[in-house]
Amino acid sequence: MTGPGREVPQGASADESARHRSGRLSGGESPSNGSTGSAATGVDQPLRYGYGTNGLTDLRLNDALSLLADLGYDGVGLTLDHMHLDPLAPDLVTRTRRVARRLEELGLGVTVETGARYVLDPWRKHGPSLLDPDPGQRARRVDLLIRAVQVAGDLGAHAVHCFSGITPENTDEDTAWKRLAETLAPVLDAATTVGIPLAIEPEPGHLLATLTDFHRLRRTLGSPDALGLTLDIGHCQCLEPLSPAECIRAAAPWLRHVQIEDMRRGLHEHLPFGDGEIDFPPVLEALATTSYQGLIVVELPRHSHAGPQLAERSLQFLHHAAAGLKSKEPDNSQDPDKTATPGEGAASEGRTP
């Protein structure tokens, strides 16, 4: 066993087994999976790239995983959905073990994502959320997230991604924040038990939309070890006052998962690399010189019709952007005592105009 519930095929080497040790709560560390897909960056911390299955929904999961391995990706951002490891269908444990074996065979790392649009409700996108006025509906989202944590343990994932949801109508902000903290508590308990961080994502338009909002939740909950951050690089460009590279450095102590794509200021639209405004070499340099060791997952959920082609082009783009990085020593930005103040205060005015 290399993680809670995680099976490794007989005869697996020590290096192969190490690939399935997830990012634990002491810092989100996740060893390289040994793939040759990581670009040589010229810095001490290698960058490990993945691609999100929410951008490959026209492919069977097994075909998507094979495609990514063939292209040279290091891992996959696996969105639990009806077409890819349905979290609500029967025999979830058995199906998860099959996916775990396939990831092992292909040498792919994994993070578990929970952003499926209609997995819980065929009428409401991303509904119900953690903020739903109905306690029974909130419980359905909690159940999904706890299932995701259990799946992540069985896969040896380095993190479980989630988000707050949009504040419901006729709900004041204080009530929404209180509801979010209370509803997340059992999910964080599950994450603590399994030993895999829950990485919440600031999402434009949601209650938790910025880095400042993340710190508000973290303080409210008493800074639990199980709570980490998913940083979407495009969202930084969209609405944070800091540049994406500065956001990475400010967020580094809490960073457990990274999503990446191009985007424009003030417009929440995930774009292929080169179609937006982001300068990517500084972004990759910032990631390479922090202690972040998880996957950097390309997220293009509205481009599944061209998923295989975009997956290939995206990895080529990232390798090219990383090729010119200069050698640097890793900084100390993973020490919260040294960086908490700039990380917490940077995004106070960071909402979309």
Image (cartoon, grey):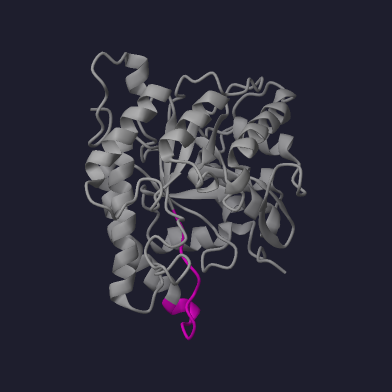
Viewer-nearest residue: 50 or 158: 50
Quarter holding residue 248: top right
Q: Position of residue 329 (x, y in %)?
A: 62, 24
Q: Residue 78: x percent and y percent?
A: 44, 43
Residue under the point 56% across and 38% down: 333
Task: Give the side of residue 179 with respect to residue 352, left or right.
Answer: left
Q: Is residue 166 magenta?
A: yes
Tell me the residue at 43%/63% (across/down): 118
**Camera-side residue of 230 and 101:** 101
Which image quadrant for residue 196? top left
Q: Is residue 286 something one can see in this rendering?
A: no
Residue sitting at the far bottom: 170
State left or right for residue 266 relative to residue 290.
right
Name the spot of residue 323 as percent of width and height, x first. Answer: 71, 23
Q: Is residue 113 visible?
A: yes
Q: Residue at x 32, y 15 (%)?
A: 14
Q: Magenta part mainly helix, strand or loop?
A: loop
| Residue in the image at 44% along x and 28% along y | 108
Query: Quarter holding the N terminus?
Result: top left
166 and 246: which is toward the camera:
166
Tag count in the figure? Answer: 0
Answer above or below: position of 186 versus 157: below
Q: Which region shows up in magenta?
A: 162-175
Residue 269 lies in the magenta stretch: no
Q: Is residue 211 above or below residue 193?
A: below
